[in-house]
Structure formats: C-alpha cells, structure tokens
Image (cartoon, helix red, strand yellow):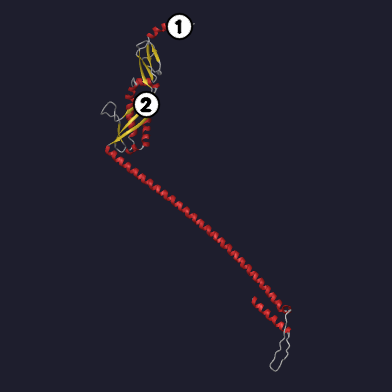
C-alpha cells in the first residue's frame, strides 16, 4: 500500500512539473498582501486585478512572464516629521504654520497609519506600487496640509495646555481619516510632539506662565488660609456655644435650687407660723379657762400641794405696848397669789 502511494505521488509530481515550470510563481510574507497585474492575457482583463492576495502564501499564474507582482505591507507604519531628519544634516521636516494670534510655530508630528488590505489594488492603480510610494505620495502631503489646518486655529498659549493639544491632534486624525480612508489608508493616531516658537516669544510665554503659576499658588494659599480661618471661626463658635449652654445649664440648676430652697423656707415658715398660731390660741384658751372660778380653784390646789408637809408659823406683831395676836385669812392670800401668778404667766406668753 505504501509503495502504491509513493508511486502515485511521484506520478503526480512528474505530471505537474511541466505545468509548474510553465507558470509564474509569486509569494507574500506574513505582513504583506499581494496585487497582481496582468500585462497580457488570453482570458480575462489586463491591468491591475481587483483581487487581494492574502499574507503568507504562494501563488502560481499561467502563462509565465505575463504578470507583474507587487506587495504592500499591512503592519502599522509611523510617519515621522520632525526638525531633525535622520541622515540629512541641515534639513527639517517639521510642520510650520501660524497660530490664530499670528505667531510662527513649528511642530514635530508622528502619524500612525496602515494600509487597508482590501484597498491594495486601488492604491496600486492610483498611488504607487509600494508602501513607501503610498507614504510619500499620499500620506505625507495629506498630513502636512490637514494637520496644519487642525492646529492653526489654536492660540499660542494653547500649545502649553495638554488637553487642547490632544483635542487638536484628534481633530487632525479625523480630518486625515475622512480624506484617506476612501483611498485605502487607515489613520490610527496623530501625535503632536515638540513645538518651537520664536526664542524671544518662548521667553515671554515662559515668564507669563511662571507668573500665572505663582498667582495661582498665591490664590490657593489665600483660599486655604480663608478656609482655615473659617474652620477656626466655626470651632470658636462651637466652643462659645458650648460654654454658653453650660452656663445656662448651671444658671437653670441654680435657679431651680433657689426656687426649691425658697419653697422649702416658705413652707417651713408657714408651718412655724401655723404652729405659733395654734400655740397662741391654746394659751389664750388656757388663760380664758384660768381666769374663771376653775382657774382660781386650780391655783389654790397647786399652792396647797406646794404647802403640804411644810410648817407654817404665825409670828406675833405689834408695838412695844405688848403682843397683839392678829389673824390671817389664808383663802384671801391664796386668791391674791393665784391671780398674780396667772397674770404674770399671761404676760410672758404674749
């Protein structure tokens, strides 16, 4: 079986060899597409063929010597235009223009672009036979014109502001995309690099920017100081409010204490007054009772109780004419004593 397969393969090679020898052989690299041009043909049309041949393949065309083969790179290309051109001393390739306020400026520009593989035959017909032809004949002229149009609307000071530079670069990319995409060129990015003004003007711009930065720093410091003062004021207000609240609380506590003490003293004085009035009324009632016959009788009883057990001696009185015996009315003495005692007690109580 294996010998039969080898024989069939050898037979196929022998039969195909004359055919291959009579064909044109063309190849593409991994990052290339091919474009075929028929110089003459028995069948089909002459000239650039509309088909695009894919990367990394080999193609055979019959008859030999009847076709031309060209390739275009499909990888990303970088077109650099700067003040310093490599290998060419003294030559500049940067883009020069005037700003909207009339100053001369030069800008280094890099454009990232690539060929649309489907449009390679169109580029072959309209532009050139190589990627370098496309760059020099199409991408470079369009870039110099359209990037200048996008940038000359800026003021001189705008080139020191990153956001405005990026916005202008994006505008330039869109202009290039609109112009080159129909021709088969895809513009990926426009990068604005170093820019150069007249040296004297650059000095003025730097000094102005430095002054603006200093002024902005001073404004920031003043604002920070104002905010700090505001915070300190709010803190002081809070402290004062706290102290006022504390003093008010202490005042309220003092007032409540004083009010409570006043109520207590008033109640105590009222109680004392009521007690004194009650005692006075009791004494008055007692005096009224003592002023009657019962009072006198009680006084007599108290005197009698006091005299109980005591010896009473009656002493004679009279002059030299002799002893005279006098009588003493004890009831009268007790009555006078009790009346005098009751009067004295009433005066002391009043």
Query: Residue 159 location, x and y as percent?
Result: 33, 36
Task: State the image quarter where residue 216 is shown.
Answer: top left
Q: Look at 28% across and 39% down and name the residue there.
A: 203
Q: Is residue 340 visible?
A: yes
Q: Name the one closer to the observer, 120 or 54.
A: 54
Q: Is residue 337 above or below residue 117?
A: below
Q: Quadrant of residue 120?
A: top left
Task: Say which label, 2 or 1, has the lower sequence index.
Answer: 1
The residue wearing badge 1 is: 6
Q: How many marks?
A: 2
Mark 2 burial class by Cα count in 10 Å: few <14, some 14-19, many 20+: many
User: 180 or 306, which is in the foreground?
Assistant: 306
Measuring from the top left, give residue 275's x and y in whole percent. Answer: 65, 69
> Residue 314 at x, y = what percent?
72, 86
Mark 2, mark 1: which one is toward the viewer? 1
Q: Position of residue 304 (x, y in %)?
A: 73, 79
Residue contact between numbered discs 2 and 1, judged by CB atoms under 8 Å = no
For the view shown, which residue lies furthest in the left direction?
A: 90
User: Measured along the vertical axis of the image, is residue 225 above or below residue 321?
Assistant: above
Q: Separation of disc 2 and disc 1 at Cα? A: 50 Å
Asked where in the image residue 49 lies, by quadrant, the reply is top left
Q: Is 324 placed above or below 206 here?
A: below
- Disc number for residue 113: 2
Q: Does the rendering let one see residue 300? A: no
Q: Secondary structure at mark 2?
A: strand
Residue located 68% across and 81% down the image: 340
- What secondary structure is found at the residue carrying circle 1? helix
Q: Residue furthest bottom?
A: 321
Circle 1 crowding by C-alpha within 10 Å: few under 14, some 14–19, many from 20: few
Screen quadrant of the C terminus: bottom right
């Amino acid at each position: 079986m294996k010998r039969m397969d080898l024989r069939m393969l050898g037979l196929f090679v022998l039969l195909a060899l004359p055919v291959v020898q009579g064909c044109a052989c063309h190849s593409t690299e991994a990052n290339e597409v091919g474009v075929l041009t028929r110089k003459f043909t028995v069948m089909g049309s002459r000239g650039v063929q509309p088909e695009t041949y894919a990367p990394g393949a080999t193609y055979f065309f019959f008859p030999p010597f009847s076709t031309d083969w060209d390739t275009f790179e499909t990888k990303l290309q970088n077109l650099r235009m700067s003040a310093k051109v490599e290998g060419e001393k003294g030559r500049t390739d940067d883009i020069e223009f005037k700003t909207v306020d009339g100053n001369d400026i030069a800008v280094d520009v890099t454009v990232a672009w690539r060929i649309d593989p489907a449009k390679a035959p169109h580029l072959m017909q309209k532009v050139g036979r190589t990627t370098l032809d496309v760059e020099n004949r199409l991408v470079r002229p369009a870039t110099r014109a359209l990037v200048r149009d996008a940038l000359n609307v800026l003021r001189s000071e705008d080139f020191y502001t990153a956001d405005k530079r990026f916005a202008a670069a994006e505008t330039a990319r869109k202009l290039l995309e609109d112009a080159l995409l129909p021709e088969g060129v895809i513009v990926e990015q426009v990068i604005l690099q170093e820019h150069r003004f007249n040296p004297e003007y650059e000095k003025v711009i730097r000094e102005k920017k430095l002054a603006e930065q200093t002024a902005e720093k001073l404004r920031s410091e003043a604002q920070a100081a104002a905010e700090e003062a505001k915070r300190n004021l709010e803190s002081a207000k809070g402290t004062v409010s706290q102290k006022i609240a504390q003093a008010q609380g202490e005042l309220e506590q003092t007032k409540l204490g004083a009010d409570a003490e006043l109520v207590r003293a008033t109640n105590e004085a009222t109680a004392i007054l009521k007690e004194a009035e009650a005692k006075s009324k009791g004494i008055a009632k007692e005096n009224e009772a003592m002023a009657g016959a019962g009072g006198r009788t009680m006084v007599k009883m108290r005197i009698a109780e006091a005299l109980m057990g005591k010896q009473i001696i009656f002493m004679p009185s009279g002059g030299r004419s002799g002893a005279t015996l006098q009588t003493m009315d004890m009831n009268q003495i007790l009555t006078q004593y009790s009346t005098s005692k009751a009067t004295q007690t009433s005066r002391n109580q009043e």
